[in-house]
Image: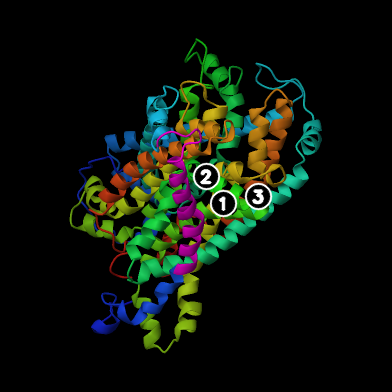
Amino acid sequence: MTSEHRGAPASWSASPPSHPGDDAREPGKRAKQRASVPGRVWRVFVWGAMVFFLANVVLLIATVAVNSIATRWFGTLLPQGFTLHWYAQAWSDFQLASVLWVTVEVVGAVVLLSVLLGVPAAYALARVQFPGKRLAMLIFLLPLMVPPVTYGIPMATVMYKVGLAGTLSGVILANLVPALPFVILVMTPFIEQIDPNLEAAARIFGANTFRYFRYVLLPLLVPGMLAAALLVLVRTIGMFELTFFTAGPATQTLVVALYYAVFSTGVRAPQSIDAMAMIYMAITLIWVLIALQFVSPTQIVSRVKEQKH
Amino acid sequence: MNSPTFPAPVAPAAPARQRDGKAWLVTPALLFIVALFIYPFAYGLALSFRPMNGGSAWANYLTFFTDTSMWPTILVTLKLAVPATLINAGVSVPVAFALRRHSRYQKFVTTLLVIPVTLGTVLIADGMLTYFGPNGWFPQALHGLHLYTSEVRLTHNFWGVLISLIVSGFPFAFLLTLSYVTGIDPTLASAAATLGASPWQQFLRIYLPLLVPGLTMAACLSFVQAFSVFPSAVLLGAPAGPTRVMSIAAAEAAFESYDYSLASAIAMVMGFVQLLVVAAMLGARRLFYSGPATGGKG
């Protein structure tokens, strides 16, 4: 329908798009027909920047992978030799078995609790007017506006006072504070753009509240909930600060253990640290791949529209 | 589906009165945030006015704004967070736009971009130390291609931290922006095109106003992430000097000198600066349309 290049003040006269289906299937062909010179330059620029960024990210990760199996690597393109010895070394050096178990418990609990608490709250905020709604919205926005370091320090102080610091529940509760508002903020616009007339239509056809929820609302909510859960999972695995402040030696998640390892480079071999980083990477990427089977993070809102075709 | 023709009582315009009970769905989440966020924050605020070593109630704040190892951290943090946010949110708009239709490219790029988001700042810092380090592939490539001949210094300084903020922050801003861009009904733009709007006009008049709420959200989240930079500022920056950000000063006070009172005071100043910036962004959002972006056809 529209050509790819938004920066181009192209001078073609508008033609009504008679076959939107064809257009979606062959965007490149149609875009080329209409592309003006500034449009093409802009396109090349956007794609060039994107390719440069992605190439560097891939190489950055490849560096960690190569170093984790290197015997010696100093100033050359590739290391002198390869070995898997560092993985066994890292597993015992950093007590990864217990660290991994803690990570699974924390992330699982945070994702489950944040969706269970967050989706009903998002529904209320998206659909109902009630006294104090603006205040509630502000309270949910605050944990995302204020950086984790800011509230992490007072929170850690309070947790030390009540004896939660260093415990598993303390780490879970701390990580829920940014996760829950995040689910609410992702879900509220998502629910807002589900047509409220669907409820009216379901009621007219005789659906009670449960049937409306089960057969109309829930199927529409599932893509958003999966997307929210994926984003929370991603954020919680990478959430360093709050765990760093509230965890004790026995309740470190993988990312905190990795930080201590990188921070004290020189105590352990860099290859051993990178082997640990690879284990962390493999676990998180497996979870992302599983999540992407159900929903792509970009389909948060478009799924509703797609189902109608 | 035809537009609903039934009259007012069930129309979305006046849903409030008969559905009041649903408002209670918000309470569990609200109670949780009050207990674990509002209360500790209030506690920290009160604590910041009770200096550990005695003195007046404002002693901690006086210390912060007079000590030369403290107050410049505000500027250092803003100098990192503002460019990072502008780059991340600004670049994500044209890129999300180029990829707004479902295609193999979109799937490929988003899958790749999820990776740095998932990995987080600590792993990126670890990788960057090798990749951008003096013997890493990046300097090797620059020297090999003769693009830059003197020594490449991209770790243990300002640039290392800024790059890490972009590597972890851009994909995040992009994925959020893309989700909002794909949520805008393309038939709205086709309607504008039928009426003679050029692609640039379609972007400016149709997409941008509908995108503003989502983009504001993406920018706010990016700024929060960038402003709270901590691990990469320690691991990739020069935590004693050029990248001594506020979080480092606060963490040092709390976990090295055990002065929770001063640490809370620094945390409060941090929160205040943050609130100023985010409130300005959200205030600007209200000026724009915030209704459905899926078009009249439902």
> How much space separates mark 1 and mark 3, taking CA atoms?
25 Å
Q: Are marks 2 and 3 in contact (CB under 8 Å)?
A: no
Taking the spot 28% from the left edge, 45% from the top edge, the residue there is B280
Give the labeled residue for mark 3: A286
Q: Which residues are magenta?
A: B27-56
Camera-side residue: B43 or B57? B57
- Front residue of B16 and B10: B16
Measured as percent of width and height from the top left, residue A142 is found at 41, 52
- In the rendered view, tell whether residue A147 sits above or below residue B240: below
Badge 3 element: helix
- Count of numbered circles on the image: 3
Q: Amino acid at mark 3?
A: Ile
Question: In which chain is the residue bearing label 3?
Answer: A
Residue, disc 2: A152
Nearest-to-viewer mark from 2 and 3? 2
Residue type highlighted by circle 2: Gly
Q: Is residue A119 left or right of residue A246?
A: left
Report if residue B51 lies within the magenta region. Answer: yes
First in sequence, mark 2 or 1: give its number: 2
Residue B216, percent across and down?
Answer: 34, 48
- Marks 2 and 1 share the same chain: yes
**For residue B200, side relative to residue A25 (left or right):** left
Q: Are marks 2 and 3 on the same chain?
A: yes
Q: Residue under mark 2: which chain is it in?
A: A
